[in-house]
Image (spheres, rainbow, N blue to C red):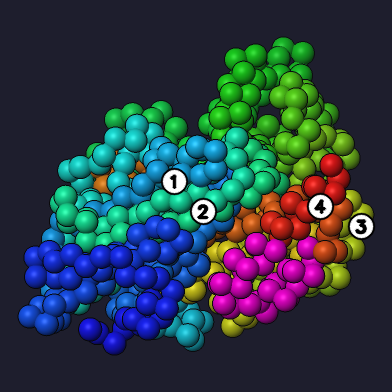
């Protein structure tokens, strides 16, 4: 036996149930918590030809070069309306063709089940990175998993075949680690308790490994609409630009059905608790002969349906300069235009929905500061539902430029430029703090969002945000900025290139999804980073629930050891799972005491 297997631990925890000879390999079947866990072990004649299978539940990447870990049962926990996931990793000393995996139905208390319709399986695709992102002094060269090849079409749920990349069956090369990603959704109405099943690794019809899966369903549910606001832009909009350019260059045609693409993009981002972006035309009020503006009934109905389908909590409206050139001289027209959004908000009947205008991107000079003051103060004086968002920290960049106080409703500083005292002062005045990340040429530490940084960097920000009263998260690029690469499935360096010479390296900057055509349909597919970000937004929901229950101080005691600041956080992803379980127990006991 290879020394990687800790057989003393296995035998001490589980009893050997049966030994079956198959194809010259020994199939050991053991039971953990009453469920079989099988693993391949080599015969003496087949030494070096074994398949090793192991699982990972915490938020971390497993590079192609990484050697096997221990095979353990998969232990998960989730609330209702929550996704929970795990990775299944494979490695062998010789090629193993035709591998596929599946997750059985999960059986729970009183005959309840979580069926396969609530399971989505992906194969991890790897990007070869030899040079680290700028300022990543912990970089390790290697093959990094990020794109996730779906086994099924995201809308029809039919198996995908014929693409350049296919999830299953998969031919495992010798001496390489490859992984699958398994997503499990806990539907509304699922009873609390323990659900059990197994994940099976097959080669055609032969089961090569079977690992028990146990999911504890906690007795509460996440709201349909997230508490944390998100503004990530429109991947469908970026996709149009991407394919239009490629069609003009004769590389490949545009999709034939853009309505279907937009629907798929909206469904995918919504499933990851990120705001989908409605078509821009729906958000442009119509001017009437008397100089007022209104939204036609059909647009209001379309927006209502969109919000219901995709659980939207924040909508970016067009910049007001689309209707006025000078906010002071045309103030009456601007106020009339804003009033149309007040009427739209009333018609949509959602008090938690916010409208905002993205007034200026990173005002970094005196003229930009003056621009924000000029527009922001007039908009705020109108006392409209439309909020003024500026991607800037509350403390002025340069005192000589003056400040932006009175011109901003939603401040959105970079992770690394957030300062607690100025932010608290604006919160006390009733203003709002969001935050965002983007490329930065400084050396400041921050949970940077790049492929070659730890995957935990995508889960940490929501914990830190809640700790400081930050209620929104913004990212640029529409999640699909591929303009600087010819093939994002191969090239990870998505930003920083120069037409001549080399620029600064930023792997995955501006991206969280990948074009889906290489896997067999038009649209987008998700990444490991997007999955970690979804988990982060779900974590935030636990904290928001506790805050609504009046348990902020108790929750803060759990959060502070992990999320000290934007410059200091716990690097062990397992600690966040432990803390999340503590939060869940606190929610359950707090709700019980109220009842």
Q: Nearer the viewer, residue 191 or 90?
A: 191
Q: Quadrant of the C terminus?
A: top right
Choose the circle earlier in sequence order: 4 or 2: 2
How packed is label 4: few (under 14 Cα within 10 Å), some, or many (20 or more)?
some
Q: Is residue 397 magenta-colored?
A: no
Segment colored magenta: 555-582
Mark 2, residues whose alpha carbon is within 10 Å: few (<14), some, or many (≥20)? Answer: many
* Residue that numbered label 2 is attached to: 215
* Mark 4 vs 3, N-terminal side: 3
Gap in Å between the C-alphas at discs 4 and 2? 22 Å
Q: Name the residue: 48% across, 39% down.
A: 113
Disc 4 marks which residue? 590
For marks 4 and 3, give the one nearer the viewer: 4
Looking at the picture, tell me which residue is in the foreground, 324 or 468.
468
Measured along the vertical axis of the image, is residue 539 above or below residue 157?
A: below
Q: Nearer the viewer, mark 1 or mark 3?
A: 1
Q: Is residue 22 above or below residue 189?
A: below
Query: Which residue lies under the disc numbered 1?
Result: 106
* Pointer 1 with pointer 2, Cβ within 8 A: yes
The Cα–Cα distance between marks 3 and 2, rounded to whole angstroms, is: 41 Å
Q: Rounded to the nearest whole Å, what is the CA distance between mark 1 and mark 2?
A: 8 Å
Identify residue for label 3: 428
Q: Residue 575 magenta-drawn?
A: yes
Pick whichever of labels 1 and 3 is earlier in the sequence. 1
If you read the primary sequence from the N terminus, does the residue marked by circle 3 or circle 2 appear first?
2
Residue count near mark 3 (Cα–Cα under 10 Å), binned few <14, some 14–19, many ≥20 = few
Between the C-alphas of marks 1 and 3, the distance is 47 Å
- How far apart marks 4 and 3 lie (CA) works out to 27 Å
The N terminus sits in image quarter:
bottom left
Residue 500 seen by the camera: no
The quarter of the displayed image where residue 264 is located: top left
């Amino acid at each position: 036996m290879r020394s990687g297997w800790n057989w003393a631990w296995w035998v001490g925890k589980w009893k050997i149930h049966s030994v079956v000879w198959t194809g010259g390999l020994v199939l050991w079947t053991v039971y953990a918590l009453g469920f079989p866990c099988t693993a391949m072990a080599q015969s003496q004649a087949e030494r070096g030809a074994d398949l090793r299978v192991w699982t990972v539940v915490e938020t971390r990447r497993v590079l192609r070069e990484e050697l096997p870990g221990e095979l353990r049962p998969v232990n998960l926990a989730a609330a209702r309306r929550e996704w929970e996931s795990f990775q299944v990793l494979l490695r062998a000393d010789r090629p193993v063709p035709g591998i596929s995996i599946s997750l059985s139905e999960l059986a729970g208390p009183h005959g309840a089940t979580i069926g396969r319709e609530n399971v989505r399986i992906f194969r991890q695709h790897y990007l070869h990175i030899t040079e680290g992102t700028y300022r990543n002094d912990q970089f390790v060269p290697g093959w990094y998993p990020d794109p996730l090849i779906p086994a099924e079409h995201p809308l029809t749920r039919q198996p995908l075949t014929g693409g350049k990349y296919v999830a299953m069956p998969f031919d495992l090369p010798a001496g390489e680690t490859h992984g699958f990603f398994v997503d499990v959704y806990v539907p509304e109405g699922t009873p609390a308790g323990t659900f059990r099943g197994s994940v099976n690794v097959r080669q055609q019809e032969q089961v090569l490994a079977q690992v028990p899966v146990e999911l504890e369903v906690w007795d509460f549910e996440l709201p349909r609409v997230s508490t944390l606001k998100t503004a990530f832009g429109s991947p469908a909009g970026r996709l149009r630009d991407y394919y239009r350019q490629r069609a003009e260059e004769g590389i490949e045609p545009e999709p034939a059905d853009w309505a279907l693409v937009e629907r798929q993009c909206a469904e995918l981002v919504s499933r990851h608790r990120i705001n989908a972006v409605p078509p821009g035309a729906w958000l442009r009020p119509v001017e009437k002969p008397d100089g007022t503006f209104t939204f036609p009934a059909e647009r209001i109905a379309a927006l209502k349906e969109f919000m219901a389908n995709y659980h939207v909590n924040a909508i970016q409206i067009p910049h007001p300069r689309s209707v006025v050139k000078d906010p002071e001289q045309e103030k009456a027209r601007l106020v009339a235009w804003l009033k149309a959004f007040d009427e739209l908000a009333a018609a949509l009947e959602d008090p938690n929905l916010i409208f905002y205008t993205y007034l200026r991107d990173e005002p970094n000079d005196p003229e930009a500061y003056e621009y924000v003051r000029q527009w922001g103060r007039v908009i705020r004086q109108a006392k409209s539902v439309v909020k003024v968002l500026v991607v800037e920290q509350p403390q002025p960049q340069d005192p000589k430029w003056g400040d932006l106080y009175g011109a901003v409703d939603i401040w959105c500083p970079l992770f690394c430029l957030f300062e607690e005292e100025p932010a608290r002062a604006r919160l006390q005045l009733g203003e709002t703090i969001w935050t965002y990340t983007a490329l930065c040429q400084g050396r400041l530490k921050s949970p940077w969002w790049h492929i070659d940084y730890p995957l935990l960097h995508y889960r940490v920000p929501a914990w830190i945000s809640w700790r400081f009263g930050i209620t929104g998260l913004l990212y640029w690029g529409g999640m699909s900025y591929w303009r600087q690469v010819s093939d994002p499935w191969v090239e990870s360096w998505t930003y920083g290139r120069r037409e001549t010479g080399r620029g600064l390296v930023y792997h995955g900057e501006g991206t969280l999804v990948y074009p889906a055509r290489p896997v067999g349909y038009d649209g987008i597919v998700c990444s490991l980073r997007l999955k970690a970000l979804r988990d982060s937004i779900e974590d935030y929901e636990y904290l928001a629930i506790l805050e609504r229950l009046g348990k902020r101080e108790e929750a803060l005691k759990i959060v502070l050891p992990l999320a000290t600041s934007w410059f200091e956080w716990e690097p062990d992803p397992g600690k966040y799972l432990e803390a999340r379980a503590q939060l869940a127990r606190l929610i359950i006991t707090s709700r019980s005491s109220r009842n």
